[in-house]
Amino acid sequence: MMRSDLLFVYGTLMSTFTHPNAMQFHAGAHCVGAAQMPGLLYRISWYPGATDRPSESNQFAESWVYGELWRLNDMQLLDVVDRYEECSPDDPSPHEYQRVLRSIHLIGTSEWQIAWVYLYQLDPRGLESIKDGRFRA
């Protein structure tokens, strides 16, 4: 199984957020830099959700989700973030998010990294699309 000590965040865990869960995350990782992944971004509520690009549509061929790539100091931090994202084994199903590995592009470089990301799992129809791919609270 593939593993990574990198996590791509695109919402309330980015460095601009200072709530307790974000601060706990920031204390256990360091920001590698601005990054992007192919995908679509939606406003779920006060937080966003990203999905993969639909494979059957050219309409979204150039859609990106923008965020930050972080390197985890301790892989157990993923368990903490799983609980924050309510997708740990202890959280009731269906989970709103699933942690998966995706290719992430470091902005300003030609570098791609494999990183964990939390993708939205519920039906996004009816949700507000964040067309520029950048979450703002």
Image (cartoon, rainbow, N blue to C red):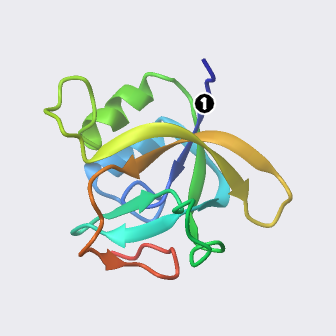
Q: Amino acid at mark 1?
A: Asp
Q: Is residue 132 above or below residue 44?
A: below
Q: Give me the residue at 42% from left, 78% from top.
A: 130
Q: Is residue 70 left or right of residue 82?
A: right
Residue 136 lies, in percent from the top left, at 39, 76
Residue 129 lies, in percent from the top left, at 37, 78
Q: Give me the residue at 62% from left, 74% from top.
A: 58
Q: Is residue 3 left or right of residue 118?
A: right
In the foreground, 24 or 114: 114
Outermost right residue = 110
Task: Please identify the quadrant where the C terminus is shown.
Answer: bottom left
Query: In which image quadrant can residue 56 be found?
Result: bottom right
Query: In which image quadrant can residue 68 be found?
Result: bottom right
Outermost top residue = 1
Outermost front residue = 56
Task: Please identify the quadrant where the N terminus is shown.
Answer: top right
Q: Is residue 63 above or below residue 83?
A: below
Mark 1 crowdedness (10 Å alpha carbons): few <14, some 14-19, many ≥20: some
Residue on which the image places disc 1: 5
Residue 87 lies, in percent from the top left, at 27, 36
Q: Give me the residue at 36% from left, 27% from top.
A: 79
In the foreground, 53 or 65: 53
For the image, the number of numbered tags is: 1
Residue 39 lies, in percent from the top left, at 54, 63
Q: Is residue 60 above or below residue 47?
A: below
In the foreground, 102 or 26: 102
Query: In which image quadrant can residue 11 be found?
Result: bottom left
Q: Is residue 34 left or right of residue 107?
A: left
Q: Is residue 14 left or right of residue 72?
A: left
In the foreground, 133 or 60: 60
Element assignment for label 1 = loop
